[in-house]
Image (tube, grey):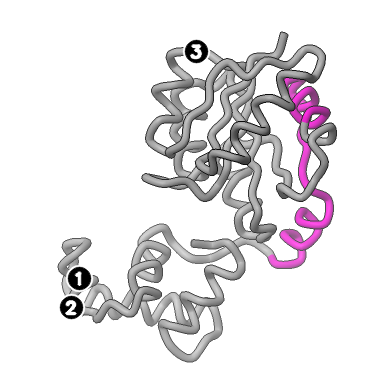
Amino acid sequence: MIRILLAEDQNMVGSALVKLLNLEPGLSVVERVCTGPEIVPAALRCQPDVAVLDIELPGCSGLDAAEQLHRQLPDCRIMMITVFGRPGYLQRAVAAGATGFLVKDRPVDELATAIRQVAASETVLDPELAAAAMRLGRTLLSSREREILILAGTGAPVADIAATIYLSEKTVRNHLSSAIGKTGTKNRFEAAQLARQNGWL
């Protein structure tokens, strides 16, 4: 029996996935969580074979949780699911240790098959998204540049960004200039928008 941890914050979707996956032969959802910070403690407690993680979760993203989970429970296979088919999300998921990535518009039986494959140490990636990720290439943004662009995308002034992450305003401006140059955009708002569209944030 393949033991599954499911992280999905939307109650209707999460409840439906639990019921449908439990109907599949050889699959058992042993725990469901609704926020990012719950993932690692729940996995350490229930020891799943596969963690199926939504990317957009309250508290922290499924991508951030996947990285922590891969470090603390390396034998647990990770499959990411998302509504947003962004190539950058796929790149970040693979970098975080995920071996499965599907967009949520796939049928449940396809998800079940993918879970079985991932549990068997195979890699299952959405083919169209994988091709797009290869065309796009790897993001050159540093983790600090991504952090600053997230804040810049909210419209926060440089002074507020600097105070939030305990950097000088000059350092924040330098990171913003670097991110703008790397994304080939005209300003920090365009850089944040492009980075978000590509799934780099």
Residue at the spot of label 2: 159
Viewport quadrant of the N terminus: top right
Chain-order first, disc 2 or disc 3:
3
Label 3 amino acid? Cys
* Residue closest to the eye, 33 or 69: 33
Residue at 45% over, 30% down: 39
SS for callout 1: helix
Q: CA distance from mark 2 to mark 3?
A: 44 Å
Residue under the image location 41 percent in, 46 percent down: 58
Kind of residue sitting beneath label 2: Ala
Q: Which quadrant of the structure image shows residue 40?
A: top left
Residue 121 lies in magenta, yes or no? Answer: yes
> What numbered label is drawn on residue 46?
3
Q: Is residue 165 magenta?
A: no
* Farthest-out residue, top: 1
Residue 127 or residue 6, whichever sits in front: 6
Q: Position of residue 16 (x, y in %)?
A: 67, 33
Tell me which corner region of the image, top left, top right, bottom left or bottom right, holds residue 107: top right
Name the residue at 58% across, 62% down.
199
**Circle 1: is it few (<14), some (14-19), or many (20+) Cα within 10 Å?**
some
- Horizontal and vertical percent position of residue 54: 57, 42
Nearer to us: label 3 or label 1: 3
State the residue position of label 1: 162
Q: Which residues are magenta?
A: 112-136
- Residue drawn where x is 54% and y is 78% of the image: 183
Task: Assign a secondary structure to mark 3.
Answer: helix
Q: Is residue 138 left or right of residue 21?
A: left
Chief secondary structure of the magenta portion:
helix
Q: Of callouts 3 and 1, which one flags the residue occurring earlier in the amino acid sequence?
A: 3
